[in-house]
Image: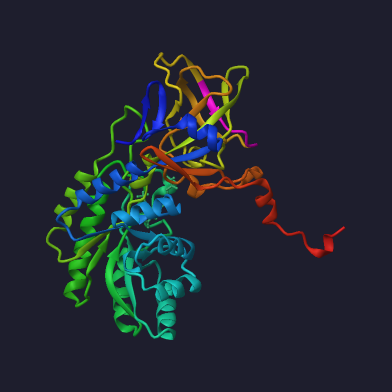
Amino acid sequence: MDHFQYRNGKLFAEDVSLEQIAAEVGTPVYVYSTATFQRHYRVFAKAFEGLDTLICYAMKANSNQAVLTTLALEGAGADVVSVGELKRALAAGIPAQKIVLSGVGKTRQEIVASLKAGIKQFNIESEAELELINIIAGEMGLIAPISVRVNPDVDAKTHEKISTGKSENKFGIPWHRTGDIYARIGALPHVTAVGVDLHIGSQLTDLEPFKIAFSKVVTLVKALHADGHDIRHIDLGGGLGIPYVAGAEAPPSPGSYGKMVANVLGDLDCSIIVEPGRLIAGNAGVLVSEVIYEKTNDSKHFYIIDAAMNDLVRPAMYDAHHEIIPVEENTAEASVTVDFVGPICESSDVFAKNRKTTALAAGDLIALKSAGAYSASMSSTYNSRPLIAEVMVNGDQYAVVRKRQTIEELIALDTVPNWLSR
Ligand code: LLP
């Protein structure tokens, strides 16, 4: 459930009309709902009630400081994948002891910053990385807490580009090497093994792949315990899918996911870390855009809108479906079949192909739903389109939580070298 609903024929975010936000802040604009973020976090937390669990929000989904602060106040930790995300999480008041560092390519700078901050654990993905962390921790006179990301070679049955748990993917340590790597951790002086980690993919709509992978991890942890390794946490990653298509069957609920985790991990004496991103953020945001033109080519009817693939790349990149609804409610039957497209010079700048919708006209506002995750955080300035504004609603108030970049600011990021001065 989210807090984007029609009231008296207009689409609202909580108690604020999207029409008002569009008029005051302009379009395109991302609009987030505080109550929806809170609700998703609380539903997820409730699903793990009774289990010793730390929720490390995967902030790559949406790393706006207002979002992070909202979640920090709920008690969330963070899964970070860069020094930039680490600094954002700390700035939002997420305690270092609730932060885990993931990623296949951690740099020296990222390792130093994480050790300095005193994060909960490094989720390592290669032997080379382990050796470097050991050296750096030694230089700093510290012992780094290590969790090994294992690759369980399980098919997550999701889009190929967001599937991460197969042996051909770049992620994690191959299953047959895990014994060796924990032995190596035991032999190194400045690292200590505290956990096991995995993440098999994103937008999973079936619990079975999770269950298979988690069961493999249970077997592994039992073997590690038997070998004397003090494994205290199991980090299950993120990946639980969300409903994108109205009326379609919903993915498993957080409740059933939590139950499955309890069943599979029940008798292990380990705490659990989970890294949900999309589940918390996805349906807590919409992208509001204006129809600029209507256009008909031989066989096609287009609505050209002022948002583009640089603002929401998911349809172009993953063939993702986002519901598109008018900001002014139209209760008539969908009467036209159109492509919703952006202005960018790429044939992939399409938000929806052959979508049935009620008729719209230039000047009408629309909302692209489920744009709270992997939208602003994946945006770019392609075609010299400045980064757009982000707005957070809370009850009857709203605030611009990232201002729209100006074209001057965008140009000012570049420098023309002396030899070109005229
Ligand atoms: N943990 C790790 C180590 C991850 O790599 C990810 C996502 C997550 C947690 C969070 O997964 P989630 O709960 O959000 O599924 N841009 C793509 C999604 C990429 C996911 C990358 N990793 C999209 O828009 O669908």
Q: Quadrant of the C terminus?
A: bottom right
| Visible residue check, residue 200 | no
How many numbered circles are shown? 0
Residue 128 higher or lower than 57, as above or below: below
Please give the name of the residue rendered at 40% of the width and 43% of the height, measured from the top-left corner. 159
Image position of 123 (left or right of 273): right
In the rendered image, residue 39 lying in the magenta stretch gets the answer no
Residue 9 higher or lower than 49, as above or below: above
Image position of 83 (left or right of 95): right
Please give the name of the residue rendered at 40% of the width and 38% of the height, measured from the top-left corner. 370
**Where does the image place residue 305, in percent across and percent down from the top left?**
57, 30
Image position of 186 (left or right of 262): right
Residue 65 higher or lower than 248, as above or below: below
**Where does the image place residue 115, in percent across and percent down from the top left?**
40, 75
Q: Quadrant of the N terminus?
A: top left
| Visible residue check, residue 341 | yes
Please give the name of the residue rendered at 40% of the width and 21% of the height, measured from the top-left corner. 9
Start-end of magenta stretch: 338-345
> Quadrant of the rendered structure where residue 231 is?
bottom left
Image position of 18 (left or right of 284): right
The foreground one among 43 and 192 is 43
Q: For the view shown, which residue lies furthest in the left direction?
A: 267
